[in-house]
Image (cartoon, rainbow, N blue to C red):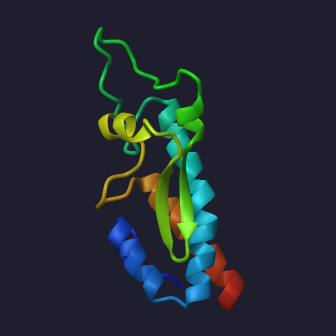
Amino acid sequence: MLKGNLSSIADFSRALKALPRTLAQQITARAAPVLTELARETFAESENAYGDPWLSGKEGEKVSLVKTGRLREQLFYVAIGTRLRVALGVRYAKYQIGKRRVFPRQGALPEAYVRALTEIAQEAAREELGP
């Protein structure tokens, strides 16, 4: 079972390293689509992962970053072994996401991410190791 503080990306990564490799891989594989959905929800609300609104546009208007929908659909997490990576599928994503963050920054994770990762880890551990 994952132990310790899971409230930051680094802490979560360290906790995964203490688990059997196959279990850690299951957790990251399950976590990727759940975290992707959380990121897309904040994108849809024009907020960062912590619930803060993005910077306004030049005229003070709310910015959506949706013109064709390609940027929104190409923001996702990918599980690579025991690690989670952010994938930006369109060439211009790094410029937009750099200015208006969608994903959590290094350090403290938003509460929704902590809850999701904890639930996923506990469920996977129960299935793999028993109650």
Quadrant of the rendered image containing residue 114:
bottom left
Residue 95 drawn at (x, y percent): 35, 36
Which of the 4 image quadrants contains residue 70?
top right
Q: Is residue 91 visible?
A: yes
Which of these two is toward me, 53 or 73?
73
Asked whether residue 3 is in view, the answer is: no
In percent of width and height, residue 82 lies at 52, 77
Residue 39 is left or right of residue 62, and the answer is right
In the rendered view, would you say 125 is above or below 88?
A: below
Total tally of numbered discs in the picture: 0
Quadrant in which the C terminus appears: bottom right
Whether 126 is drawn above or below 113: the answer is below
Please tell me which residue lies in front, 126 or 102. Answer: 102
Residue at 37% x, 58% y: name it.
109
Q: Residue furthest top?
A: 59
Name the spot of residue 81 as percent of width and height, x first: 55, 76
* Residue at x 63%, y 76% (from the top left corner): 26
Residue 123 placement, left or right of 107 = right
Rendered residue at 42%/81% (across/down): 15
Examine the image and state in which quarter residue 80 appears.
Answer: bottom right
> In the image, what residue occupies the spot 41% across and 75% down?
13
Q: Is residue 19 toward the left or the right of residue 13 in the image? A: right
Residue extending furthest toward the front: 91
The percent position of residue 5, horizontal first and vertical second, equals: 36, 74
Nearer to the camera, 10 or 91: 91
